[in-house]
Image: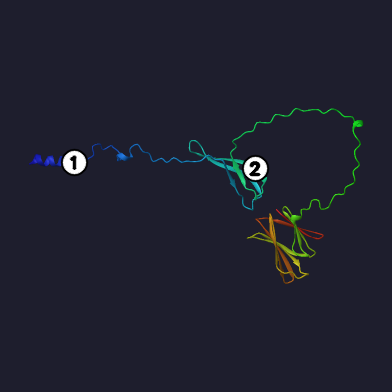
Amino acid sequence: MQKILWLFLSLAVILEARENPFETSMSPQTVGKTTQIKDELTDFKSTTLTLPSSARILKSASVTFQNLDGSISEEIVAIDQNVDWHLPLMLSQKTETTAPKPSAPVVTPPSIEKKDLPPAPLLKEEKPSSTANVNASNAFKLNEDLSFFINQNEITIFTKESKIRDFLIADPYKVVIDFKKVNAYGTKSLEFNKAPFVSATLGSHDGFYRIALLLDGHYRYDLQAFNGGYIVKLK
């Protein structure tokens, strides 16, 4: 009876115990497989970056990259130059090199004595035109008393009225100028679409009229008076 009891206990232990206690609990289906996922990256060609309208000076450019050993590094290039935020910045990898073109041989022309030259034709005196550098597409007329001329970051307001005050408002950015009211004007808008100037709006108020210049971004400005109106310079 004692032998039968020992035999039963031995069979129970053999059925519940593992054959090798040091063997990992890995199923046969997972043997030989790894959990590492390979990143599939494309080759870099180029990318662009658009700056906010408040940007004026590009101080530096930095590139963050991963090294062969997996560590992360950064390279910074100092620039410190003016930048036009309207134009996007581009980063690209140079792949082609152009060989320098061979210089053309220098040919020395034969010397010509002054006596061999024909007499120069007489030219009529030409007077420079005062409107030679004026682009008509940059001139705008709001009414008979108000007109504008845009030259890059400057806008000239032609008016006979005196300025009362001027100020800048945001969201959206506008340069607002109030003038003494002499004539009665109705509300009127004029589209420019000449960056950085978008439009001008004329509004009549009690005792003065207002011109609001809508801008395409963030700016500071200077206002200068001249005989015939005012010049607004953005910066």
Q: Which mark is residue 67?
A: none
- Residue nearer the viewer, 121 or 217: 121
**Height in image: 20 above or below 180?**
above
Q: Is residue 110 above or below residue 42?
A: above
Residue at numbered disc 1: 13
**Label 2 Cα crowd, 10 Å radius (few <14 / some 14-19 / many 20+):** few
Check disc 1 and report its element: helix, strand or loop. Answer: helix
Which residue occupies the foreground of this view, 177 or 9?
Answer: 177
Residue that extends furthest to the left in the rendered view of this protein? 1
Q: Mark 2 or mark 1: which comes first in sequence?
A: 1
- Name the foreground residue: 215 vs 189: 189
Q: Secondary structure at mark 2?
A: strand
Question: Residue 102 location in percent, x, y?
Answer: 70, 29
- Marking on residue 79: 2
Q: Are marks 2 and 1 in contact (CB under 8 Å)?
A: no
- Locate the N terminus and report the quarter of the image it occupies: top left
Q: Position of residue 21 (x, y in %)?
A: 26, 38
Residue at 18% across, 41% down: 13
Mark 2 and mark 1: Cα distance apart in space: 78 Å
Dot 1 surroundings within 10 Å: few (below 14), some, or many (20 or more)? few
Q: Which amino acid type corresponds to the residue marked 1 in the rendered image? A: Val
Q: Position of residue 40 (x, y in %)?
A: 47, 41
- Residue 24: x %, y % from top left: 30, 39
Q: Along the line of sight, which residue is nearer the eye, 91 or 67?
A: 91
Residue lying at 66% horizontally and 44% vertically, measured from the top left: 80
